[in-house]
Image: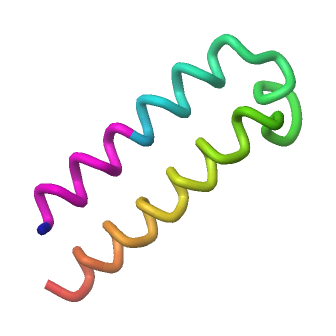
Amino acid sequence: MADSLHTRYMAASDAWRIHRKGCEPCQIKQPCETGAPLFERLTRLQDAYLNHLRNH
């Protein structure tokens, strides 16, 4: 499970980074309508992955 969780976390990080790089609103303030779900997914997976590391 950890490998799968890590893979999903890294994919979410890549998707957010790629979107943010080309989106001015996401670069200077809060995420745009398209970027918000990407950022939310990244933060959820990051929390889950960090919790997994703390518990194992």
As drawn, which residue projects farthest toward the bottom?
Answer: 55
Relative side of 11 to 17, left or right: left
**Is residue 10 located in the magenta-colored stretch of the structure?**
yes
Residue shown at 48% from the left, 30% from the top: 15
Q: Position of residue 16 (x, y in %)?
A: 55, 33
Magenta region, mostly helix, strand or loop?
A: helix
What range of the chain is rendered magenta? Answer: 2-11
Q: Quadrant of the N terminus?
A: bottom left
Between residue 11 and residue 27, name the one nearer to us: 11
Relative side of 32 to 48, left or right: right
Q: Position of residue 52 (x, y in %)?
A: 25, 77
Residue shown at 62% from the left, 55% from the top: 40
Up/down of 49 relative to 33, above or below? below
Q: Position of residue 56 (x, y in %)?
A: 13, 84
Between residue 50 and residue 8, name the one nearer to us: 8
Up/down of 50 relative to 13, above or below? below
Up/down of 1 relative to 3, above or below? below
Q: Quadrant of residue 47?
A: bottom left
Relative side of 28 to 15, left or right: right
